[in-house]
Image: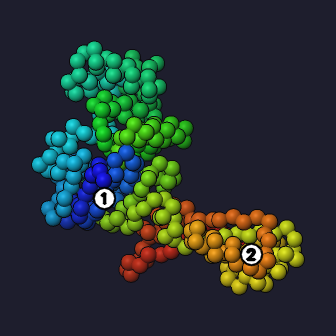
Amino acid sequence: MTNPAILANGLRKSYGDKVVLDGIDLSVPEGTIFSLLGPNGAGKTTAVKILSTLVPAGPGSGTIRIAGHELPAGAQAARAAIGVTGQFSAVDGLITGEENMLLMADLHHLSKSEGRRVAAELLARFDLVEAAKKPASTYSGGMKRRLDIAMTLVGGPRIIFLDEPTTGLDPRSRHTMWGIIRELVTDGVTVFLTTQYLEEADQLADRIAVLHDGKIAAEGTAEQLKRLVPGGHIRLRFTDPAAYRDAAGSLAQAAAHDEEALTLQLPSDGSQRDLRAVLDQLDAAGIEADELTVHTPDLDDVFFALTETTAGSGATVPAPSKETVR
Ligand code: ADP
C-alpha cells in the first residue's frame, strides 16, 4: 500500500467567528483526480491554501500529510512536491508567456539551457508557441489558464492543486482544459481539483467530496453519489398496447404508467443487484419490453439534495428526479 498523496484528518479553519472548515477528512491516492465540489464561498480555496502550505490549518486540526510530509513541520519538503494554480494565478501580464516560463525555470534553479528547453517543451505542449512572444496580458482566459498550468509544471510537481481551473471559461476552452487535466494524471501526477461545476467533477474526478457548511456532506465516486438520492428508475417501453397492459397489470411496483407512450417506470437505485432483480421478475412474469433504459439521478440532483436544507430543521430535502413522471 502506498501512502495517499494528500491526507487530512479533521481539518479546521475559522476566520474570526466564521467557521469555514469544520473538521474535514480527505485522503487522495497517488495518480488520481480528486474533486472538492462546492458553491461559491463553501471553503474550497481555503482548503487548497492549507493543503498547499500557503496558510496554516486552524487549531484543533488533525494530521495533514502532503506527499508524505506532515504539516507544518514538513511544509518545505511538501512544497517541493506540489504545484498550485488557480485564482491567485502566478501569470505576470506585463511580460511574455515565454518570459513567464523562463522566470519560473529560474525560480526552480534550472540552468539557462535546461530552462529554455523545458519552457519550449511546455509552451508547445500547451499550444502556446505562437503566443509565446506576446505579453501575457493579451492572452484570452483559456490561454492564461494554460500558461498558468505550464508554469506550474516547470518544477515537475507530483501533486497539482487546481483551484477552479475552468471558472469563467467558454465551453471550448473548458473542454481543452479537461483534456489537459486528464493528461496530467496519465503521467502519475495527483490532481486536487476544486470546482463549482458538477459536470466537471463528473467528467474528471475519480472521487468527489461535496463541501457544505464546512463539512464533507458526501464523498464517493460520481456513480456512488448519484445513488444517494431518489429518482433513479428503470423505464420499460412497449410497442404493443396489449403487451403494455399485461405488464402494467402484473408489475405492482410500477411507480408511473404512461398509456400514451406505452411506458412503465419502476423505482431503482441503478445498482446491478437491483437491475438483476427486475430482469428476473420480468422473465418470471413473461414480460418482454421492447426497450429497457436505466435512469440514474445526475450530480445536480445529488448536489441539491445534499446542500439544500429546510429552513430551521436542517433536514436534507430529497431532490426530485429530473425525469418527469407522468
Ligand atoms: P470558495 O473557494 O469555496 O469560494 P473560500 O475558501 O474562498 O470559498 O471562502 C470561504 C469563506 O471564508 C468565505 O465566506 C470567505 O469570505 C471566507 N474567507 C476566506 N478567506 C478569508 C480571509 N483571509 N479572511 C476572512 N475571511 C475569509
Left or right of 43 in this view: 306:
right
According to the picture, the residue beneath numbered tag 1 turns out to be 26
**Residue 77: image x %, image y %?**
17, 41
The residue shown at (59%, 65%) is 296
Kindly tell me whether residue 9 is visible in this rendering.
yes
Label 1 vs 2, first from the N-terminus: 1
User: Residue most toward the front?
Assistant: 1
Badge 2 amino acid: Asp
The C terminus lies in which quarter of the figure?
bottom right
The image shows a total of numbered marks equal to: 2
Please tell me whether mark 2 sits on a helix, a strand or a loop: helix
Quarter of the image for residue 109 reads top left
Badge 1 amino acid: Leu
User: Residue most toward the top?
Assistant: 113
**Residue 321: image x %, image y %?**
59, 70
Left or right of 112 in this view: 229:
right
The residue shown at (20%, 43%) is 78
According to the picture, the residue beneath numbered tag 2 turns out to be 283
